[in-house]
Amino acid sequence: MANKEENKLEIISVITTFYNAEKFIFNAINSVNQQIIEGFDFEYVIVDDKSPDNSRAIVEAFIEKNVPEDRKAKWKIYEPEENLGCGGARKFGIDHAIGDYFMFLDADDYYMHTNFMINAYHTITKENADVVEYGVMFNQPNGQQINNTASQKYVIENNPSLAEIALFKDNLIKFNVWSKIYKRWVVESYPYSTVRTYEDVRTIPVWISNAHKIVIMPTAEINYRAASGSIIRTDMVQTRLGTITAITELFPRFKDDYNVLKAMYGRAMVDLEALLHNHSSNDPGFNEMSRLNTIMLSYLYPDKYKEMTYNIDLEQEAAAKAQETENKPTEE
């Protein structure tokens, strides 16, 4: 990492990764180019995750034609040796960023207001916060817009348990990596997950837990486009199973905080209920979800969880033996 000279302005690193984003990336990078930069410096780290489409050409042409000369050097395109997936590409971008603060922007989203970065910088510095959360305008494939924003300003200080409950239960803090500004040390406190699915769910709870002060602002700043072809829209089983898996993986980290475990379990059950609504335990993925449920309950109720669940392995073993007996030839 490069060391900044003393008396230099603090730097915000904005990180965007792209893969097959040619339809939308112009809006994303244009919203960064329009930001007011006063009282701080910035760099724009753009990661080309071996994208096979025309995204990179669009970015390069945009930089050449639209970015002011005094800002061009701050726009930096990096490309890994192989496709890393969303999580790996973000970590790759983090590893190449030099900022004192970090912001993220997906290639198919955009910042709604030109003063977002300057307001985010002023808020995190004046509040001496480690993380500042902002609202999101969700745009659904059917054209519906949902403003997911806190009703008022909230401050959570030196209370990681309350922060996790705000994340898992109250929805005041979002799992989205891109709805926040972070101090550098928070981002470096835990490596961004390189698992190719639900990487935010595996990372954000840890960053939030590590932060000493979190400020939640009541303004929507990011326009989020829900992709109609994403796994979240096309494979409900894998979506719900993936979220529950990511949450279950975090249970050992928060095993000493019963209230947080309850909030995490409640959030996981939202996904299980959504999958099983009007369905039965014969649905695909149910056994795996039951296994994950047993793991979570073993942390919540270590002395009683076996009474609250059934052993899926034994059930499957019994069924296999029954099938084997049924198929066994009858001796004459």
Image: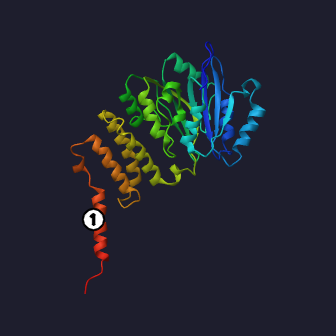
Q: Please tell me which residue is depicted at 21% across the width and 45% down the height of the picture.
A: 304
Q: Is residue 178 visible?
A: yes
The location of residue 160, given as percent across then percent down, is: 38, 27
The location of residue 91, given as percent across then percent down, is: 55, 36
Q: Is residue 103 above or below residue 282?
A: above
Question: Residue tagged by mark 1?
Answer: 318
* Residue 7: quarter of image: top right
Q: Residue furthest bottom?
A: 332
Q: Is residue 107 visible?
A: no
Q: Is residue 211 above or below residue 292?
A: above
Identify which amino acid the numbered label 1 is placed on. Ala
Q: Quadrant of the C terminus?
A: bottom left
Q: Please tell me which residue is depicted at 74% across the width and 36% down the height of the picture.
A: 62
Using a 10 Å C-alpha cutoff, classify the residue at mark 1 as few (fewer than 14 neighbours), some (14 to 19) or many (20 or more): few
- Say left or right for 75 vs 90: right
- Say left or right for 128 vs 59: left
Q: Quadrant of the N terminus?
A: top right
The location of residue 292, given as percent across then percent down, is: 35, 49
Q: Is residue 64 above or below residue 123?
A: below
Q: Please tell me which residue is depicted at 41% across the width and 59% down the height of the picture.
A: 284
The location of residue 208, given as percent across then percent down, is: 44, 30
Of residue 107 and residue 5, the one placed in the foreground of this image is 5
- Say left or right for 63 vs 254: right
- Say left or right for 315 vs 48: left
Q: Please tell me which residue is depicted at 56% across the width and 22% down the height of the picture.
A: 100
Q: Residue furthest right?
A: 65
* Residue 122: quarter of image: top right
